[in-house]
Every structure is written in structure tokens, then in C-alpha cells.
């Protein structure tokens, strides 16, 4: 292989592995979401990994605050919450009472739903593995109140949270995340006011993954009803 061709291939490989992007796969907003901007919002990242929890909650909270929402990360207010521990009915009631006693009437809950990798070979006979950008057939949570959803088996994180520094390889990482937004001032069957399903491709670090995803979530919530996507 001549030097010029080698340099070109190396450039393509590095570009493929250094670009991070967020793709909103599916989104829905309720017609009664307008009052949510005035709520006292608890931001929760559902994971047993405390560093990942802090990174996601901090970034999502910061982005919401920038756009005028009143938000607090759960790791600051409730550091011992353990959001990815399976709930008993008793524990569900404890959390309900805790949120009510602290004045929270809104929740933004994010969950890592899936992790995928795709590989690419450059040159003759090149092949790229298929990739699925998210859950387009995920369960319909409309009609679930927050506490019912929070205890649902499908609402927990997949727990794949490792994000290593990017290397010069032909492997692209895809993280599929889901965010549900609840207005606790509403009747139980109307508490769900937004759903966002997004994929973050090839982040170099966990900080970048959290930052990009937090920005996408806050922008989506800030959009007007006319601009928002519907199922």
C-alpha cells in the first residue's frame, strides 16, 4: 500500500471513530405538558453505577436549568436513592412519600435501554454489521402513573455503562437511551407528559455521552407542541 493511500485510510478510520452524534429515534408529548415548565423537577438516571448516575443527572439538570426549568439531580437531593434497585410495594410508597414531602411534582427519568456495536472494514470485500437505532416498538407507557412505571420491570437500566476513550479502530458504539417525563400534579393516568427515545453514537467518553444526550433532551422538552414529534 502506498503512503498516500495509507494516510487516507487512517484519516477515514479516525473520523469514523471520533464523531459523536445524537439521533432522536422517537418522541411524544402530551397536550397538557405546558404547565410542566413550572414544576419542581427531580432528574433521575436509572443506573447502579454512581459515577454514571452523577454524570447523566448533572448534565441533564444543567441543560434544563439553561432553558428555564426548575430541576435538581437526585444524587444531590437523595444520594442514597439507589434508583436501579428493584422496588417492593413498600419501597414504592416510601419514594412517593419522599418526593411529596420534599415538594417535587415533576420527574425526568432516563434509562440506558440498549448497547450495540458495529464494525466496518475498509478495502475490497468491505462489510458493515447491521445496527438498530433504537426501540421503535417500545411499550406504550401512556396511562401509567410515575410510580407504576418506576416499578415496571422494563423501566430498569440495561447496566452496560462502560465508555472507554476512543481508539483508532473500526468499531462504532451505539447507546440507546429512553427518557420519560412525569407531571405528578396530574391524575395518575395523565402524569406522563413526554417520552423521548434517542441513540448516541460513538461517544469518546462518558462525559461526552451525558453532555450530548442531556442537550438533546432539554431541547426536545423546550420545543413547542407544534415543533415536537408525535407517535
Image (cartoon, grey):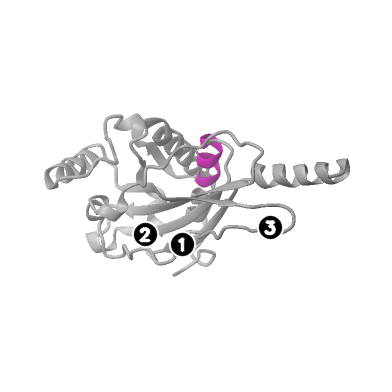
Residue 24 in picture, x, y percent from top left? 52, 58
Q: Secondary structure at mark 2?
A: strand
| Residue range highlighted in magenta | 206-213
Q: Position of residue 48 (x, y in %)?
A: 33, 36
Pointer 2 residue: 193
Query: Is residue 221 covered in magenta?
Result: no
Secondary structure of the magenta portion, mostly? helix
Residue name at image x 59 percent, y 38 percent: 204
Q: Residue lying furthest left in this view?
A: 90
Q: For mark 1, what is the residue?
A: 27
Check the picture and name the quadrant holding the N terminus: top right
Upstream in the sequence, badge 3 or badge 2?
3
Disc number lying in front (1 or 3): 3
Marking on residue 126: 3
Locate the C terminus and report the quarter of the image it occupies: bottom left
Q: Is residue 78 above or below residue 156?
A: above
User: Mark 1: which secondary structure?
Assistant: strand
Q: Report the side of 97 relative to 230 (left or right).
A: left
For marks 1 and 3 on the same chain, the one whose residue lies earlier in the sequence: 1
Label 1 vs 2, first from the N-terminus = 1
Q: Which mark is residue 75?
A: none
Neighbour class for label 3 at 10 Å: few (<14), some, many (≥20)?
few
On screen, residue 54 above or below 108? above
Element type at mark 3 = loop
CB-based contact (under 8 Å), mark 3 and mark 2:
no
Give how far apart the Cα atoms at labels 1 and 3 are.
34 Å
Amino acid at each position: 500500500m502506498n503512503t498516500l493511500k495509507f494516510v487516507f485510510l487512517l484519516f477515514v478510520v479516525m473520523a469514523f471513530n471520533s464523531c459523536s452524534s445524537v439521533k432522536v429515534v422517537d418522541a411524544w408529548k402530551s397536550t397538557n405538558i405546558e404547565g410542566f415548565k413550572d414544576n419542581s423537577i427531580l432528574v433521575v438516571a436509572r443506573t447502579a453505577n454512581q459515577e454514571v448516575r452523577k454524570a447523566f443527572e448533572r448534565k441533564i439538570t444543567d441543560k434544563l436549568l439553561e432553558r428555564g426549568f426548575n430541576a435538581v439531580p437526585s444524587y444531590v437531593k437523595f444520594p442514597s436513592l439507589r434508583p436501579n434497585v428493584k422496588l417492593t410495594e413498600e419501597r414504592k410508597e416510601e419514594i412517593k412519600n419522599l418526593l411529596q414531602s420534599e415538594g417535587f411534582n415533576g420527574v425526568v427519568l432516563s434509562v440506558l435501554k440498549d448497547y450495540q456495536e458495529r464494525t466496518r472494514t475498509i478495502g475490497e470485500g468491505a462489510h458493515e454489521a447491521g445496527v438498530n437505532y433504537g426501540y421503535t416498538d417500545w411499550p406504550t407507557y401512556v396511562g401509567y402513573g410515575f410510580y407504576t412505571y418506576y416499578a415496571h420491570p422494563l423501566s430498569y437500566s440495561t447496566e452496560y455503562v462502560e465508555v472507554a476513550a476512543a481508539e483508532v479502530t473500526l468499531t462504532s458504539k451505539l447507546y440507546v437511551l429512553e427518557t420519560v417525563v412525569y407531571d405528578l400534579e396530574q391524575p395518575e393516568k395523565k402524569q406522563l407528559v413526554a417520552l423521548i427515545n434517542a441513540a448516541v453514537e460513538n461517544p469518546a467518553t462518558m462525559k461526552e455521552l451525558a453532555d450530548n444526550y442531556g442537550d438533546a433532551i432539554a431541547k426536545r422538552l423546550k420545543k413547542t407542541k407544534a415543533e415536537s414529534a408525535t407517535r
